[in-house]
Image (cartoon, rainbow, N blue to C red):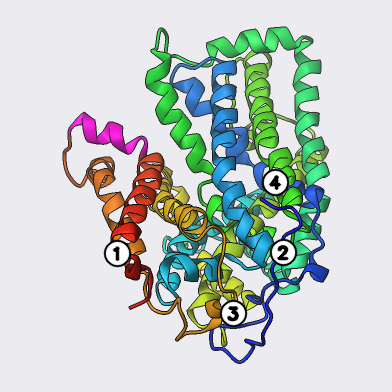
Amino acid sequence: MQDHEIVELKQDVSNSPLYNEDFAPVPANKRSWDKWNIAAIWVGMAVCIPTYMLASSLIGQGMNWYQALFTILLGNVIVLIPMVLNAHVGTKYGIPLPVFLRLNFGISGSVLASLLRGLVACGWFGIQTWIGGAAIYQMLLALVPSLANTPYLGDFIGLNVLQLVCFLIFWLINMFIIYKGIDSIKKLETWAAPFLLLIGIGMLAWAWIEVGSMGKILDASYTLSAQKDVNFWSIFWPGLTAMVGFWATLSLNIPDFTRYAKSQKDQILGQAIGLPTTMALFSFIGIAVTSATLLIFGEAIWDPVVLLGKFDSAVVVVLSMIGLTVATLSTNIAANVVAPANSFANILPSKISFTMGGYITGIIGILIFPWKLMADPEGYIFKWLIAYSALLGALAGIMICDYYIIRKTKLDLAALFDPEGMYKGWNVNAWIAFGVSIIPVLPGFFGTVELMEVSTFWTDLYSYAWFVTFFLSAIIYYILVKVNPKGTRGL
């Protein structure tokens, strides 16, 4: 990868129906993100409740603390590879994911491909917005407990007045940042990153001071799991797949951010500094603090919101909830708004801007009633949304194979904005590879969602869904291109 190589658009394509200012390649003189800005984006996204609780499932299945931490770190080092590879096109050509997908899946096919990435983020946007609103709600209750008695809005809504108001307040904060544009996201993440790290270190310091010894805390971690004498490898591989899947979504739309990077060196170092280190550190904080709660309260408390309920000081609760709100906001904006906003804009670029796409995302986030989805996380989050990683693995495999192996990182930038040009229509080879690659994991998916009974072979294979679809789609696509090179041209 050449550090200095930035390719700029040489002709005017502003009259194209595929063009808008948000999709326009970012010229070199407008690249303002260095490695620390890229790292801050990752700190802002990685410091969140799911990361804090990430080790809980691994330890619950029988891992000890350092096995769980190693699995988390390795999973993030692995996902860093497709992350850096897909980021290259953003930095070299200055284009976001939907425009990149025009190369891989055809200009018409890119609409569906980008929606496959964007729609899953809409679900997570709603859920994270509900979590952020709930933090504001708990903060207000700590100050005025009687607010819990505000009128109930009926079973259809399922909330009281204050809960709905807090949800909408946090939703409006998200919408305001969308209104301010992509550069406001950089400012938010740059400001939030050190603040969030201080909050995490503060929690660790509290646990250490209360217990008096880190050794005692880590010794207590061995009692977190009720599972004993478990074969490590039987839980390691599914656990590793889950850790890779945690950021599989961002490994697709990372060009949305790296198109603002000054150089390839900045995007590579920024991601290497920000992603695996923050995930490992904040996961360790979750392990240590939870282990400390065993000694302090006599029970393991993984959920930081529940832990805060143990404190009597309103000041501690308010400050902690502010930290939780900022953490949720920084994760939500970067991880769950940018991708769907660009996806919706790609449907009709000349009419829908990034900002309008963000507003559409926000409206969907309300209409899905995320508090009701959270009431059944097993059914929605763990079965449906996480299962989506199989589709995302297939997309990623084709994207990387096409860009690096087939096209050698070369593309015609102007043709990406020409509806009748060389990338028009649907890239048939890509869509055949996509469809065929997900077939082996479908039985396991159907078994997981209880639509049919399947053997353990299929459920075990499904445990590796992202890896299966990633490698299979890349191999199939490569073979198809060699057999039928014209299949990469649009229909």
Q: The residue under label 4 is which amino acid type? A: Ile
Residue 62 seen: yes
Label 3 sits on residue = 414
Q: Badge 4 local density, few (<14 within 10 Å), some, or many (20+)?
A: many
Q: The residue under label 1 is which amino acid type? A: Asn
Q: Badge 3 local density, few (<14 within 10 Å), some, or many (20+)?
A: some
Q: Could you tell whether 206 is left or right of 295 in the image? A: right
Q: CA distance from mark 2 to mark 1?
A: 31 Å
Q: The residue under label 3 is which amino acid type? A: Ala
Label 4 sits on residue = 268
Q: CA distance from mark 1 to mark 3?
A: 25 Å
Is 463 in the magenta?
A: yes
Q: As displayed, is residue 437 above or below residue 218?
A: below
Q: CA distance from mark 4 to mark 3?
A: 26 Å
Look at 54% across and 18% down and name the residue there.
Answer: 67
Judged from the image, the secondary structure of the residue bearing numbered disc 1 is: loop
Label 2 sits on residue = 6
Q: Earlier in the sequence, mark 2 or mark 1?
A: 2
- Tags 3 and 2 in contact by the CB under 8 Å rule? no
Label 1 sits on residue = 484
Q: Which residues are magenta?
A: 455-464
Report the front residue among 282 and 174: 282
Q: Earlier in the sequence, mark 3 or mark 2?
A: 2
- Residue 29 shows which numbered tag? none
